[in-house]
Amino acid sequence: FLLDYALNPSAKFPTRLGLDANFQLEQKQKENGAKVLDSGGRSVFLGPVATININPNVSFSGSFLAPVYQDLGGVHQEVDFVWTLGSKVVW
């Protein structure tokens, strides 16, 4: 889920700021046919995202997401944050 707002739509390189929500679901892993108890879980992340459009076909974006809910399905390490950098090319 992503909400964003154009800061400067008429600029040479339009920029959009937004809010990103991400839901992750991991199913239980199996080892030798048996479910691993300390695996799987559900997490929800929320945070800001920025996108810069270089032209109608090329854009760059980045986000920083912090966990707002984690049900890890056992005893394993919690996620502190998730950050992404990306580009999109349309042809």
Image (cartoon, grey):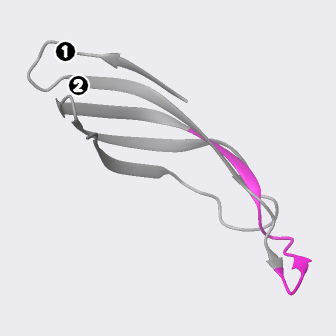
Nearest the camera: 91 or 2? 91
Residue at figure coordinates x 19%, y 15% from the top left: 8
Describe residue 13's horizontal placement relative to residue 6 as left or right: left
Give percent across and percent down for residue 38.
80, 70
Task: Give the crowd class for mark 1: few <14, some 14-19, many >=20 residues within 10 Å.
Answer: few
Label 2, label 1: how many angstroms apart (C-alpha)?
6 Å
Find out whether residue 38 is within the magenta segment. Answer: yes
In the picture shown, does residue 39 fall above or below 33? above
Q: Position of residue 47 (x, y in %)?
A: 47, 35
Q: Quadrant of the C terminus?
A: top left
At horizontal 29% and vertical 16% (from top left) the residue drawn is: 6
The residue furthest right is 34
Q: Are marks 2 and 1 in contact (CB under 8 Å)?
A: yes
Q: Which residues are magenta?
A: 31-45
Question: Which element type, helix, strand or loop, lies under badge 2?
Answer: strand
| Vertical side of 46 occupied by 87: above or below | below
Where is residue 66? Give x, y as percent: 52, 43
Above or below, 66 against 76 in this view is above
Q: Is residue 3 above or below residue 33?
A: above
Using residue 19 as the reference point, say whether residue 45 is left or right of it: right
Q: Which dot marks residue 15?
A: 2
Q: Residue at x 35, y 16 (%)?
A: 5
Which amino acid type corresponds to the residue marked 1 in the rendered image?
Asn
Considering depth in this image, is 61 or 69 the residue closer to the camera?
Answer: 61
Mark 1 lies on residue? 8
Q: Quadrant of residue 53?
A: top left
Q: Amino acid at mark 2?
A: Thr
Q: State which tag comes first along the sequence, 2 or 1.
A: 1
* Magenta stretch encompasses residue 39: yes
The quarter in which the N terminus is drawn is top right
